[in-house]
Amino acid sequence: MDTPALPKFENVYPIPRKEPRLDGVTSWLYDQIDKIDRDMDATEEGKGKIVSWSSGLPSVDSLTNGFQQSQYYVIAGQTGFGKSSFALTTALTLAVASEPSVLFVSLEMSQQDMAIRGISWLTGIAQSKIVQAIAGRIRLSPEERQGISTSKAFVRDRTRMMCGGMLTPEDVRKEAVALQKGNGLSLVIVDYLQLMRGTAKSYATREREVAEVSRSLRSLSLDLNVPVIALSQLSRQANTRNEPLLTDLRESGSLEQDASAVLFLSQVKDERTKHIAPDRVKIAIAKNRFGPKGDRVVRFLGASGRFEDLEVPDDPAPGNAWPSEPGDPE
Protein backbone atom coordinates (compact mmCIF):
# COMPACT_ATOMS: atom_id res chain seq x y z
CA MET A 1 0.00 0.00 0.00
CA ASP A 2 1.36 3.39 -1.00
CA THR A 3 2.02 5.85 1.78
CA PRO A 4 -0.31 8.85 1.48
CA ALA A 5 1.42 12.12 0.65
CA LEU A 6 1.81 14.53 3.54
CA PRO A 7 0.09 17.91 3.20
CA LYS A 8 2.30 20.77 2.14
CA PHE A 9 3.46 22.97 4.97
CA GLU A 10 2.05 26.13 3.48
CA ASN A 11 -1.40 24.54 3.25
CA VAL A 12 -1.41 23.96 6.98
CA TYR A 13 0.33 27.12 8.14
CA PRO A 14 0.09 29.79 5.42
CA ILE A 15 3.39 31.60 5.01
CA PRO A 16 3.07 35.30 4.20
CA ARG A 17 4.64 36.30 0.91
CA LYS A 18 5.72 39.66 2.26
CA GLU A 19 8.42 40.19 4.86
CA PRO A 20 6.49 40.44 8.17
CA ARG A 21 6.65 43.61 10.15
CA LEU A 22 8.85 42.87 13.16
CA ASP A 23 7.68 44.72 16.23
CA GLY A 24 6.49 43.84 19.71
CA VAL A 25 6.00 40.12 20.33
CA THR A 26 6.75 39.25 16.71
CA SER A 27 10.19 40.88 16.90
CA TRP A 28 10.97 39.08 20.15
CA LEU A 29 9.97 35.71 18.68
CA TYR A 30 12.00 36.37 15.53
CA ASP A 31 15.09 37.22 17.62
CA GLN A 32 14.74 34.05 19.70
CA ILE A 33 14.31 31.79 16.66
CA ASP A 34 17.28 33.45 15.03
CA LYS A 35 19.37 32.91 18.17
CA ILE A 36 18.41 29.22 18.34
CA ASP A 37 19.26 28.85 14.65
CA ARG A 38 22.69 30.40 15.16
CA ASP A 39 23.30 28.34 18.31
CA MET A 40 22.60 25.16 16.34
CA ASP A 41 25.07 26.25 13.66
CA ALA A 42 27.72 26.89 16.32
CA THR A 43 27.06 23.52 17.99
CA GLU A 44 27.40 21.67 14.69
CA GLU A 45 30.71 23.44 14.11
CA GLY A 46 31.93 22.54 17.59
CA LYS A 47 31.91 26.17 18.72
CA GLY A 48 28.67 26.21 20.69
CA LYS A 49 28.38 27.16 24.34
CA ILE A 50 27.27 24.57 26.89
CA VAL A 51 23.58 25.01 27.63
CA SER A 52 23.12 21.97 29.88
CA TRP A 53 25.05 20.30 32.67
CA SER A 54 25.42 16.60 33.35
CA SER A 55 23.80 15.03 36.40
CA GLY A 56 26.87 12.79 36.62
CA LEU A 57 24.74 9.91 35.31
CA PRO A 58 24.74 9.70 31.50
CA SER A 59 21.80 7.27 31.56
CA VAL A 60 19.65 9.92 33.26
CA ASP A 61 21.02 12.65 30.98
CA SER A 62 19.86 10.62 27.98
CA LEU A 63 16.29 11.30 29.12
CA THR A 64 16.60 14.84 30.48
CA ASN A 65 19.31 16.16 28.12
CA GLY A 66 21.10 17.28 31.27
CA PHE A 67 20.12 20.15 33.55
CA GLN A 68 19.41 22.99 31.14
CA GLN A 69 19.80 26.73 31.48
CA SER A 70 16.80 28.70 32.77
CA GLN A 71 15.00 25.52 33.89
CA TYR A 72 13.71 24.58 37.32
CA TYR A 73 13.94 20.96 38.49
CA VAL A 74 12.40 19.16 41.45
CA ILE A 75 14.04 15.96 42.73
CA ALA A 76 11.89 14.16 45.27
CA GLY A 77 12.04 11.04 47.40
CA GLN A 78 11.52 9.73 50.88
CA THR A 79 14.16 10.23 53.57
CA GLY A 80 17.18 7.98 53.08
CA PHE A 81 16.69 7.41 49.35
CA GLY A 82 19.75 9.44 48.38
CA LYS A 83 18.37 12.84 47.30
CA SER A 84 21.26 14.78 48.81
CA SER A 85 23.82 12.29 47.47
CA PHE A 86 22.32 12.55 43.98
CA ALA A 87 22.53 16.35 44.12
CA LEU A 88 26.10 16.18 45.44
CA THR A 89 27.01 13.83 42.58
CA THR A 90 25.87 16.52 40.15
CA ALA A 91 27.71 19.31 41.98
CA LEU A 92 31.01 17.46 42.27
CA THR A 93 30.84 16.16 38.70
CA LEU A 94 30.89 19.79 37.57
CA ALA A 95 33.65 20.68 40.04
CA VAL A 96 35.86 17.85 38.79
CA ALA A 97 35.21 18.93 35.19
CA SER A 98 36.43 22.46 36.07
CA GLU A 99 33.10 24.08 35.24
CA PRO A 100 31.86 27.38 36.75
CA SER A 101 30.93 27.39 40.42
CA VAL A 102 28.02 25.44 41.87
CA LEU A 103 25.98 26.98 44.68
CA PHE A 104 24.86 24.19 47.03
CA VAL A 105 22.38 25.35 49.66
CA SER A 106 21.80 22.96 52.56
CA LEU A 107 19.19 23.70 55.20
CA GLU A 108 19.72 20.51 57.21
CA MET A 109 23.49 19.89 57.25
CA SER A 110 26.48 21.83 58.55
CA GLN A 111 29.43 22.78 56.39
CA GLN A 112 31.50 20.03 58.03
CA ASP A 113 28.80 17.45 57.25
CA MET A 114 28.84 18.55 53.62
CA ALA A 115 32.65 18.47 53.56
CA ILE A 116 32.69 14.89 54.88
CA ARG A 117 30.27 13.84 52.15
CA GLY A 118 32.36 15.63 49.55
CA ILE A 119 35.61 13.97 50.70
CA SER A 120 33.94 10.57 50.67
CA TRP A 121 32.56 11.10 47.15
CA LEU A 122 35.89 12.31 45.78
CA THR A 123 38.12 9.71 47.44
CA GLY A 124 35.87 6.67 47.92
CA ILE A 125 36.69 6.60 51.66
CA ALA A 126 33.55 5.66 53.64
CA GLN A 127 31.90 8.57 55.41
CA SER A 128 31.84 6.64 58.70
CA LYS A 129 35.61 6.11 58.45
CA ILE A 130 36.23 9.82 57.93
CA VAL A 131 34.08 10.66 60.96
CA GLN A 132 36.02 8.19 63.09
CA ALA A 133 39.32 9.68 61.92
CA ILE A 134 38.15 13.21 62.79
CA ALA A 135 37.17 11.99 66.27
CA GLY A 136 40.60 10.40 66.73
CA ARG A 137 39.27 6.86 66.98
CA ILE A 138 41.20 5.55 63.98
CA ARG A 139 44.02 6.66 61.70
CA LEU A 140 43.71 6.78 57.97
CA SER A 141 46.40 5.24 55.82
CA PRO A 142 49.01 7.51 54.17
CA GLU A 143 47.34 6.79 50.82
CA GLU A 144 43.95 7.86 52.16
CA ARG A 145 45.39 11.03 53.65
CA GLN A 146 47.06 11.81 50.33
CA GLY A 147 43.73 11.28 48.58
CA ILE A 148 42.06 13.80 50.87
CA SER A 149 44.81 16.36 50.24
CA THR A 150 44.57 15.84 46.50
CA SER A 151 40.76 16.18 46.51
CA LYS A 152 41.02 19.82 47.57
CA ALA A 153 42.38 20.78 44.17
CA PHE A 154 39.19 19.53 42.47
CA VAL A 155 36.82 21.84 44.32
CA ARG A 156 38.87 24.97 44.89
CA ASP A 157 36.73 27.99 43.93
CA ARG A 158 34.21 25.68 42.22
CA THR A 159 31.72 24.94 44.97
CA ARG A 160 30.05 27.36 47.37
CA MET A 161 28.12 26.01 50.33
CA MET A 162 25.37 27.88 52.15
CA CYS A 163 24.24 26.16 55.33
CA GLY A 164 21.57 27.34 57.75
CA GLY A 165 18.09 26.60 58.97
CA MET A 166 16.44 29.98 58.33
CA LEU A 167 17.45 30.80 54.77
CA THR A 168 15.07 32.44 52.30
CA PRO A 169 15.03 32.52 48.49
CA GLU A 170 16.29 36.10 48.68
CA ASP A 171 19.38 34.91 50.61
CA VAL A 172 20.04 32.38 47.86
CA ARG A 173 19.52 34.97 45.12
CA LYS A 174 22.06 37.39 46.64
CA GLU A 175 24.72 34.67 46.87
CA ALA A 176 23.96 33.36 43.38
CA VAL A 177 24.23 36.84 41.82
CA ALA A 178 27.57 37.43 43.58
CA LEU A 179 28.94 34.12 42.31
CA GLN A 180 27.77 34.76 38.77
CA LYS A 181 29.51 38.13 38.73
CA GLY A 182 32.69 36.56 40.14
CA ASN A 183 33.84 33.09 39.07
CA GLY A 184 30.67 32.32 37.11
CA LEU A 185 27.73 30.12 38.08
CA SER A 186 26.72 26.82 36.51
CA LEU A 187 23.75 25.81 38.67
CA VAL A 188 22.03 26.20 42.04
CA ILE A 189 20.96 23.31 44.30
CA VAL A 190 18.61 23.71 47.29
CA ASP A 191 18.45 20.88 49.84
CA TYR A 192 15.64 20.88 50.61
CA LEU A 193 12.74 23.09 49.57
CA GLN A 194 10.30 22.47 52.45
CA LEU A 195 12.86 23.74 55.00
CA MET A 196 13.22 27.11 53.28
CA ARG A 197 11.25 30.08 54.59
CA GLY A 198 9.31 32.63 52.59
CA THR A 199 9.94 36.35 52.82
CA ALA A 200 6.57 37.33 54.34
CA LYS A 201 6.11 37.54 58.10
CA SER A 202 3.23 35.07 58.05
CA TYR A 203 1.18 32.91 55.68
CA ALA A 204 -2.38 31.65 55.80
CA THR A 205 -1.13 28.09 55.25
CA ARG A 206 2.17 26.30 55.00
CA GLU A 207 1.22 25.32 51.44
CA ARG A 208 1.16 28.99 50.40
CA GLU A 209 4.60 29.57 51.88
CA VAL A 210 6.08 26.56 50.04
CA ALA A 211 4.39 27.75 46.84
CA GLU A 212 6.02 31.16 47.17
CA VAL A 213 9.43 29.59 47.78
CA SER A 214 8.99 27.40 44.69
CA ARG A 215 7.96 30.35 42.50
CA SER A 216 10.95 32.35 43.75
CA LEU A 217 13.37 29.56 42.83
CA ARG A 218 11.72 29.24 39.44
CA SER A 219 12.16 32.99 38.94
CA LEU A 220 15.83 32.69 39.95
CA SER A 221 16.48 30.15 37.19
CA LEU A 222 14.95 32.49 34.61
CA ASP A 223 16.64 35.66 35.82
CA LEU A 224 20.16 34.19 36.06
CA ASN A 225 19.81 31.80 33.09
CA VAL A 226 21.02 28.82 35.14
CA PRO A 227 19.33 25.56 36.15
CA VAL A 228 17.98 25.50 39.68
CA ILE A 229 17.48 22.12 41.38
CA ALA A 230 15.23 21.90 44.43
CA LEU A 231 15.12 18.72 46.49
CA SER A 232 11.73 17.87 47.94
CA GLN A 233 10.20 15.48 50.42
CA LEU A 234 7.18 13.34 49.62
CA SER A 235 3.97 13.10 51.61
CA ARG A 236 3.35 10.06 53.81
CA GLN A 237 0.82 8.79 51.28
CA ALA A 238 3.75 7.89 49.03
CA ASN A 239 4.61 5.08 51.47
CA THR A 240 1.43 3.28 50.48
CA ARG A 241 2.45 2.99 46.82
CA ASN A 242 5.17 1.19 44.91
CA GLU A 243 5.69 4.23 42.70
CA PRO A 244 5.39 7.87 43.86
CA LEU A 245 3.00 10.19 42.06
CA LEU A 246 3.22 13.89 41.31
CA THR A 247 0.43 14.43 43.84
CA ASP A 248 2.79 13.08 46.53
CA LEU A 249 4.97 16.20 46.39
CA ARG A 250 4.74 17.48 49.94
CA GLU A 251 2.93 20.64 51.03
CA SER A 252 2.37 22.21 47.65
CA GLY A 253 0.65 21.38 44.39
CA SER A 254 2.56 24.26 42.79
CA LEU A 255 5.81 22.26 42.62
CA GLU A 256 4.48 20.16 39.77
CA GLN A 257 3.33 23.26 37.89
CA ASP A 258 6.52 25.26 38.44
CA ALA A 259 9.03 22.54 37.55
CA SER A 260 10.29 21.85 34.04
CA ALA A 261 10.99 18.29 35.16
CA VAL A 262 10.26 16.20 38.25
CA LEU A 263 12.52 13.28 39.16
CA PHE A 264 11.57 10.66 41.76
CA LEU A 265 14.08 8.50 43.63
CA SER A 266 12.68 5.20 44.94
CA GLN A 267 13.74 1.75 46.09
CA VAL A 268 14.27 -1.19 43.80
CA LYS A 269 13.27 -4.78 44.56
CA ASP A 270 15.48 -7.68 43.49
CA GLU A 271 13.58 -9.59 40.81
CA ARG A 272 14.67 -12.97 42.18
CA THR A 273 14.38 -12.50 45.95
CA LYS A 274 11.71 -9.73 45.93
CA HIS A 275 13.77 -8.03 48.65
CA ILE A 276 14.89 -4.41 48.53
CA ALA A 277 18.21 -4.10 46.70
CA PRO A 278 20.32 -1.89 49.02
CA ASP A 279 22.65 -0.73 46.25
CA ARG A 280 20.02 0.10 43.63
CA VAL A 281 17.89 3.21 43.20
CA LYS A 282 15.28 3.91 40.55
CA ILE A 283 15.30 7.43 39.13
CA ALA A 284 11.96 8.07 37.43
CA ILE A 285 11.26 11.14 35.31
CA ALA A 286 7.59 11.74 36.13
CA LYS A 287 7.37 15.08 34.32
CA ASN A 288 9.63 16.30 31.53
CA ARG A 289 8.60 19.43 29.69
CA PHE A 290 11.26 19.04 26.98
CA GLY A 291 11.69 15.30 26.66
CA PRO A 292 10.32 11.83 27.34
CA LYS A 293 9.25 10.34 30.63
CA GLY A 294 10.96 7.18 31.75
CA ASP A 295 13.17 5.68 34.42
CA ARG A 296 16.67 4.40 34.99
CA VAL A 297 17.98 2.02 37.65
CA VAL A 298 21.41 3.11 38.92
CA ARG A 299 23.90 1.91 41.50
CA PHE A 300 24.03 3.74 44.84
CA LEU A 301 27.17 3.31 46.93
CA GLY A 302 25.81 4.40 50.30
CA ALA A 303 29.14 4.31 52.14
CA SER A 304 30.63 7.02 49.90
CA GLY A 305 27.37 8.59 48.69
CA ARG A 306 28.19 7.99 45.03
CA PHE A 307 25.74 7.24 42.25
CA GLU A 308 26.97 5.27 39.24
CA ASP A 309 25.40 4.08 36.03
CA LEU A 310 24.90 0.37 35.63
CA GLU A 311 25.18 0.83 31.88
CA VAL A 312 26.40 3.92 30.06
CA PRO A 313 24.26 4.86 27.01
CA ASP A 314 25.96 4.92 23.63
CA ASP A 315 24.92 8.52 23.02
CA PRO A 316 24.76 10.51 26.27
CA ALA A 317 23.24 13.96 26.28
CA PRO A 318 25.50 16.81 25.20
CA GLY A 319 27.01 18.99 27.89
CA ASN A 320 30.09 18.97 30.06
CA ALA A 321 32.43 16.02 30.36
CA TRP A 322 31.70 13.48 33.07
CA PRO A 323 34.88 11.62 34.11
CA SER A 324 34.27 8.17 35.58
CA GLU A 325 36.63 8.89 38.44
CA PRO A 326 37.90 12.17 39.95
CA GLY A 327 40.97 13.30 38.10
CA ASP A 328 40.54 11.17 34.99
CA PRO A 329 41.83 12.95 31.88
CA GLU A 330 39.27 14.19 29.43
Image (cartoon, rainbow, N blue to C red):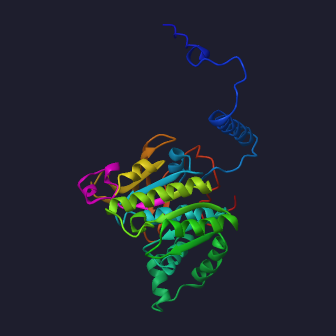
Q: Is residue 160 magenta?
A: no
Looking at the image, the residue that sits furthest to the left is 240
Looking at the image, residue 153 lies above or below residue 40: below
Taking the spot 68% from the left edge, 35% from the top edge, the residue there is 27
Task: Decide which of 88, 120 is in the foreground and name it.
Answer: 88
Q: Quadrant of residue 79?
A: bottom left
Residue 205 screen position, x and y as percent: 31, 62
* Stretch of the chain drawn in magenta: 230-251
Task: Decide which of 16, 264 is in the foreground and name it.
Answer: 16
Task: Decide which of 150, 224 is in the foreground and name it.
Answer: 224
Residue 11 screen position, x and y as percent: 58, 13
Residue 105 visible from this viewpoint:
yes
Looking at the image, residue 289 lies above or below residue 305: above
Task: Decide which of 224, 188 is in the foreground and name it.
Answer: 224
Q: Quadrant of residue 325?
A: bottom right
Q: Is residue 240 magenta?
A: yes
Q: Quadrant of the C terminus?
A: bottom right
Taking the spot 48% from the left edge, 65% from the top edge, the residue there is 190
Taking the spot 26% from the left edge, 58% from the top edge, the residue there is 239
The total number of labels drawn is: 0
Residue 279 visible from this viewpoint:
no
Looking at the image, the residue that sits furthest to the bottom is 136
73 lies left or right of 53 = left
Q: Quadrant of residue 240?
A: bottom left
139 lies left or right of 150 = left
Residue 76 screen position, x and y as percent: 39, 57
303 lies left or right of 187 = left
